[in-house]
Image: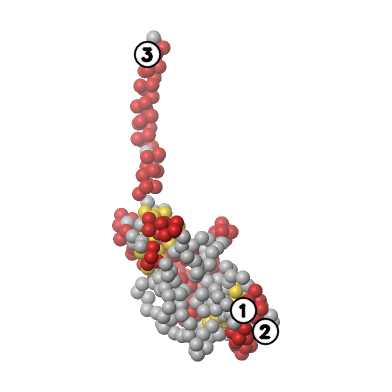
Amino acid sequence: MNQSRVALAAIATLIPLAMITTVYTGRPALQDREEQEKITVVASFYPLYEFASRVVGDRAEVSSLVPAGVEPHDWEPTAEDVSRGRAADVLVINGAGFERWADDMQAKVVANTSEGIEFNYREENEAGDDEQGHEDAGGGGVNPHIWLDPMLAKHQIDKIRDVMASSDPANTDYYNQNADRFTAELDSLDAFIRSELADCNKSDFIAFHDAFTHFSERYGLRQHSIHGVSPEGEILPQTIQQIIELANGFGINIIYSEDLIDSRLADTIANEIPNGKVLVLSPIEGIGNEEQAAGIRYIDKMKQNIANLKEGLECR
């Protein structure tokens, strides 16, 4: 009997202590509450995923619809992807016609990061002349690859910042600080590019697809491309011949391929020009798992591009 009373007394003492400890530390309950209160952000593909991640920091959960290492131009969402997009608090897209499927997703809030950009409507064919136009991912002559221009990337960051501030006003200052920090890095990247490309013998280069229009306009270069605004599709033999003749005409000996695309077409063209060589000029449309694990991000990829571009442009 005495033993039972002792045991009951011990239990009666331990229960309040356990409750006090839980209330004091608050860890299990607080962690659960913090996880539940985080808003969810779904980005369409890699650059938007990184941009959104940099803005929201640890105050939101960010994921990408297009998987790592997958070329996003012709990607189509599955039923599960559509459900994720609809369930998210914010859907971040590039816009400018890149995500044809975005309207059908019926997201709660959409951060269209190209909204407000004044596009130049130009028509030029894959070989870089002005005789035959091609359409972009959304039609109408708009080139959607704005993230490759650091100054337009700043515009995208601002759009994400604004939407996050309106969706989660309690963390507005935090989002502003993160956005300001990243835009400062983009300003530094812009200065780096201008310095690296300041003294080059050439200004023409041949990209695998028409991804570097905005980049070229920003830095005074002239892009020619094998494919149009999408790297997919068949290339006719006469187009290959046009590219070979163009390379010879401009004295170009480097053909740029991409990291998510088979390089055999670029290899074929390079083999037909004097001292031909293939290097990667990444449109940064997706970063593979190995690169992500190694900590390689958007600015790292941009600097890799500049190093390879300098070789093709014969920069000092």
Sequence-first tag of 2 and 3: 3
* Mark in front: 2 vs 3: 2
Measure how far apart labels 1 and 3 are at the Cα level: 86 Å
Q: Is residue 17 above or below residue 100?
A: above
Q: Is residue 243 left or right of residue 76?
A: right
Q: Is residue 64 above or below residue 133?
A: above
Measure how far apart labels 2 and 1 are at the Cα level: 10 Å
Q: Is residue 91 left or right of residue 312?
A: left
Q: Residues within 10 Å of mark 2 (few under 14, many from 20)?
A: some
Disc 2 to disc 1: CB gap under 8 Å: yes
Q: Say which residue label 3 marks.
A: 5
Q: Is residue 256 above or below residue 61?
A: below
Q: Say which residue label 1 marks.
A: 255
Q: Amino acid at mark 3?
A: Arg
Q: Which disc is residue 223 wearing?
A: none
Q: Quadrant of the C terminus?
A: bottom right
Sequence-first tag of 2 and 1: 1
Under tag 2, what secondary structure?
loop
Q: Say which residue label 2 marks.
A: 273
Asked whether residue 74 appears in the rendered view, the answer is: yes
Q: Amino acid at mark 1?
A: Ile
Task: Point out residue 211 in the picture as x, y percentages from the top left corner.
Answer: 50, 76
Measure how far apart labels 2 and 3 are at the Cα level: 95 Å
Task: Point out residue 225 in the picture as x, y percentages from the top left corner.
Answer: 55, 80
Q: Residue at x 30, y 57 (%)?
A: 169
Q: Amino acid at mark 2?
A: Ile
Asked whether residue 200 appears in the rendered view, the answer is: no
Under tag 3, what secondary structure?
helix
